[in-house]
Image (spheres, grey):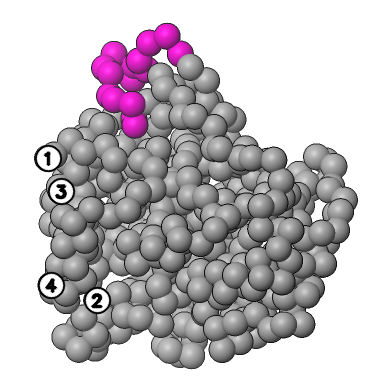
């Protein structure tokens, strides 16, 4: 089969959709399928390359900030591994304000709109030169589905699968200017559902949300679970990686092989002796914010002063400007910035407990939940909704403490449960038991769920 995957985000970008579709693309290429990926440009990667058997085509930019990073050769911007966390400078704060007040109110359908026209030109060329059997469009961003629809119009015989990481219009806060584009956005999402041959979401809550919003047109939806792929820690090598006889830069070196040594090694995260709790992932207002946890931590310090010096909360992942001040001024919090998946998996093993801050929605399941499950560590979960996707995903696996958040706070009674959970010794499962938990989330298992929908004749 010849398959074309349309995703703005692909390896070496550190993002859940990039991780998922890099893994699946390489798996199918290894099985002998001809797999092409059309994604956005990166300065450290060539426009055309073959990475682990996958033919990668890069065109256009997936956001306005990527245009700045590309032409300024900036390697410390958002989405860059090892960039660290620091207080936003004056220029960054101004740029963020301009983005929020001007650009965010103008772009459509999302901030990847800059990617659409360059990617569409490349898409037309690919469809003329290669007889694809199927095309997969990936979101977020929703722009990817507009490209999938364009492919379907150009080649109606193509089997089109829509993969939805997060809904487009079903959001607590609109992803674009709802006053200008609200009706158009809903119409486009409905038309996407009507014209796609198959639609995949990450959890049953998303299926229910789409049915409530769009009715029977959402009946074709299927659920494919989160994907887990263990990542070996990189080691130092003596020289740059070469792909097809060309050095394609440090970022692309990482992309050449999941097991390939790279030329640089980031220092290990600073973890001191004590009671270590780790949060992994980003925070997004208003869906996922740290406020309730910071309030809980403040009360913990006041109630149990002896924990003040022992308890350290490690945040791994990007910290956006709106959260920096609150996190930086809270005692006991260390921010490590965006790290590679290998480093984050290794850091999880250094923690005594893992922290998970739930979403305020019932239809979004963060992909990191499977990494939490695989880690085998006790997990403290702040739950904001009754039908919590994380709790449903976790099931009856032991080691989970659920703290309901109501009116933005954890109750005094639940705080006592939190303190009791922290000070108890929790047995950890064996490696065999941990691997057994995530067997159905491995690349072959998740790929099989997609193959039933993609590899049809």
CA gap, disc 1 to disc 4? Answer: 22 Å
- Label 2, residues with CA under 10 Å away: few <14, some 14-19, many ≥20: many
Q: Judge the density around disc 1: few (<14), some (14-19), many (≥20) Cα neighbours within 10 Å.
A: few
Residue, disc 4: 102
* Residue 283 sits in quarter: bottom left
- In the image, taking residue 75 as reference, residue 440 lies left or right, namely right
Q: Are marks 4 and 3 in contact (CB under 8 Å)?
A: no
**Residue matched to label 3:** 67
Frontmost of labels 2 and 4 is: 4
Is 101 above or below relative to 51?
below
For disc 3, the neighbor class at 10 Å (few under 14, some 14 to 19, many from 20) is some
Q: CA distance from mark 2 to mark 1?
A: 26 Å
The residues colored magenta run: 237-252
Foreground tag (4 vs 3): 4
Q: Is residue 116 left or right of residue 321?
A: left
Whether 235 is drawn above or below 27: the answer is above
For the point 43% across and 45% down, which residue is it? Answer: 338
Q: Quadrant of the N terminus?
A: top left
Mark 1, residue position: 71
């Amino acid at each position: 089969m010849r398959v074309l995957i349309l995703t703005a985000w692909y390896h070496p970008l550190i993002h859940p959709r990039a991780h998922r579709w890099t893994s699946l693309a390489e798996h199918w290429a290894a099985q002998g399928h001809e797999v092409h990926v059309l994604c956005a440009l990166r300065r450290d990667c060539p426009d055309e390359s073959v990475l682990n058997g996958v033919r990668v085509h890069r065109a256009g930019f997936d956001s306005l900030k990527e245009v700045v990073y590309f032409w300024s050769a900036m390697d410390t911007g958002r989405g860059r591994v090892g960039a660290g966390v620091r207080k936003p400078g004056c220029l960054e704060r101004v740029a963020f304000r301009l983005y929020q007040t001007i650009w965010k109110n103008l772009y459509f359908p999302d901030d990847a709109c800059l990617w659409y026209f360059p990617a569409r030109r490349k898409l037309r060329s690919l469809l003329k030169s290669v007889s694809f059997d199927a095309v997969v469009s990936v979101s977020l961003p929703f722009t990817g589905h507009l490209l999938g629809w364009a492919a379907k119009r150009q080649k109606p015989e193509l089997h089109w699968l829509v993969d939805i990481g997060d809904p487009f219009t079903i959001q607590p806060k609109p992803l674009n200017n709802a006053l200008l584009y609200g009706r158009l956005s809903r119409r486009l999402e409905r038309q996407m559902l009507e014209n796609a041959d198959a639609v995949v979401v990450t959890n049953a809550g998303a299926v229910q949300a789409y049915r409530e919003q769009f009715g029977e047109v959402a009946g074709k939806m299927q659920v494919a679970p989160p994907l887990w792929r263990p990542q070996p820690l990189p080691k130092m090598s003596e020289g740059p990686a070469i792909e097809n006889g060309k050095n394609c830069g440090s970022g692309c070196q990482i992309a050449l092989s999941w097991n390939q040594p790279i030329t640089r090694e980031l220092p290990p995260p600073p973890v001191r002796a004590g009671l270590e709790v780790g949060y992994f992932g980003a925070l997004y207002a208003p869906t996922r914010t740290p406020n309730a946890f910071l309030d809980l931590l403040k009360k913990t310090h006041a109630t149990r002063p002896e924990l003040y010096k022992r308890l350290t909360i490690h945040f791994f992942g990007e910290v956006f400007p709106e959260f920096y001040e609150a996190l930086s001024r809270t005692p006991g919090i260390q921010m490590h910035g965006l790290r590679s998946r290998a480093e984050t998996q290794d850091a999880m093993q250094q923690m005594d407990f893992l922290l998970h801050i739930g979403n305020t929605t019932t239809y979004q399941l963060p992909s990191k939940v499977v990494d939490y499950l695989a880690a085998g560590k006790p997990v403290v979960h702040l739950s904001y909704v009754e039908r919590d996707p994380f709790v449903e995903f976790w099931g009856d696996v032991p080691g989970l403490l659920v703290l309901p958040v109501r009116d933005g706070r954890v109750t005094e009674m639940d705080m006592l449960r939190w303190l009791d959970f922290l000070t108890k010794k929790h047995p950890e499962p064996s490696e065999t038991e941990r691997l057994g938990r995530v067997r159905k989330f491995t690349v072959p298992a998740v790929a099989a769920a997609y193959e039933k929908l993609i590899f049809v004749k």
